[in-house]
Amino acid sequence: MVKKVYNVAIVGATGAVGQRIMDILQDKNFPIGELKLLSSERSAGKKIMFNDQEITVEVASENSFSGVDIAFFSAGGEISTTLAPIAVKQGAIVIDNTSAYRMDESVPLIVPEVNSDDLKEHQGMIANPNCSTIQMAVALQPIKESFGVNRIVVSTYQAVSGAGLAAEKELENQTKQYINDEEMSAEILPVGSDKKHFPIAYNALPQIDVFEDNGYTAEEMKMINETKKIFNDETMSIAATCVRLPIVTSHSESIYIEIDQKGVSVAQIREVLEDAEGVVLQDDPNTQTYPTPLAATNKEPIFVGRIRKDLDNERGFHMWVVGDNLLKGAALNTVQIAQSLIENKLV
Ligand code: NAP
Ligand code: 3JN
């Protein structure tokens, strides 16, 4: 018999992503039986309302997952590495928001608009891609399908909420300090665990996550490797530069692509984007119509504008892509994966 409701756990429920997962489950009337809200000891005991029911946050542990059907993980890679396999062993399907399993060959890495078919291969663990990867994949999928895409050069303009609630607070504090002519205190950005910290207020930091030996940051390498895996195309050539800006929510990306076909017009690119799932085209220079992070915040789609043909390469196009990093970039994509599992009877 088909199960009509699912017992759900959210690991990291009190964080920036976890809170959004809860909001979306509520807004979308997700068929929940029991909901467990899990965190570290810091937030344990906190009471949170969900669908008129008060739920007490518990410490996430290896005993948290008995009877859980779907477990959303967004408490960092270490917690996923420790607890996600235990949850799977106890019968839960884990949808993991961290990078811990994204490049694991046995774990599907899913953007539903692109590769929901890969869910059929799941073995209990499913990975949600990085926020910057997700919005680029949603925007490029229709173009790749119609015209082929062989090269991507992307520069990101990322909001501080991508680095968690503490980074949001850091931007707020530094902004007040700057306005009051005080010295700005920087303790988190660009990366909490790295040696140096710089103010993000009134600034731009060309470092997201730690540096790798090749000179790229881990965020840049995530965009490169995850995009190839999602499109199942190792031949794509991809370069990324990831930059943090003093914006609270929604990431923007300047994307240059080279398509396979010759003779394709901007109008044709716009046409395929207009019909695409999860995309809203906002592109009219005559009326100054283009996406911005403020306007994209709290919205579900990925917004695309500023589409131009490269002046020196007839197969080259530039575009500007904006999406709410906590919604489609994280929580919404995660819940859509769960919905797709249910629709396709894979849970
Ligand atoms: P956040 O606002 O700092 O929240 C962190 C959450 O994890 C809180 O609920 C925290 O609980 C919990 N947590 C921390 N240490 C824990 C522990 N030892 N045991 C159990 N729970 C623990 O961070 P966030 O922005 O929500 O991001 C959380 C994670 O999601 C990130 O580390 C990243 O891996 C992933 N993420 C993915 C994307 C994406 O691109 N798809 C975007 C952002 C984040 P307390 O309240 O008790 O501290
Ligand atoms: O900084 C951003 O805008 C996105 C950050 C995502 C993030 C933050 C901490 C750890 C991740 C991620 O999802 O890749 C991770 C991680 O799990 O590696």
Image (cartoon, rainbow, N blue to C red):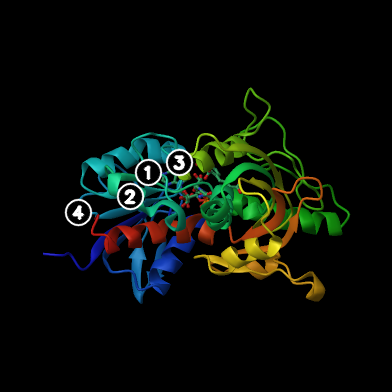
> Which dot, 1 or 3, sits closer to the camera?
3
List the residue tagged with mark 2. 119
Q: CA distance from mark 3 to mark 4?
A: 34 Å
Q: Amino acid at mark 3?
A: Asn
Q: Amino acid at mark 4?
A: Gly
Residue nearest the viewer, comparing 299 with 199:
299
Q: Amino acid at mark 1?
A: Pro
Q: Position of residue 272 (x, y in %)?
A: 57, 64
Q: Position of residue 324 (x, y in %)?
A: 59, 61
Q: Amino acid at mark 2?
A: Leu
**Quarter in which the N terminus is drawn:** bottom left
Number of the label disc, if any, that sits on residue 108: 1
Could you tell whether 271 is left or right of 197 in the image? Answer: left
Are discs 1 and 2 less than 8 Å apart at CB? yes
Q: Position of residue 226 (x, y in %)?
A: 51, 40
Residue nearest the viewer, comparing 170 with 206:
206
222, above or below 129, in the image: above
Number of the label disc, if any, that sits on residue 67: 4
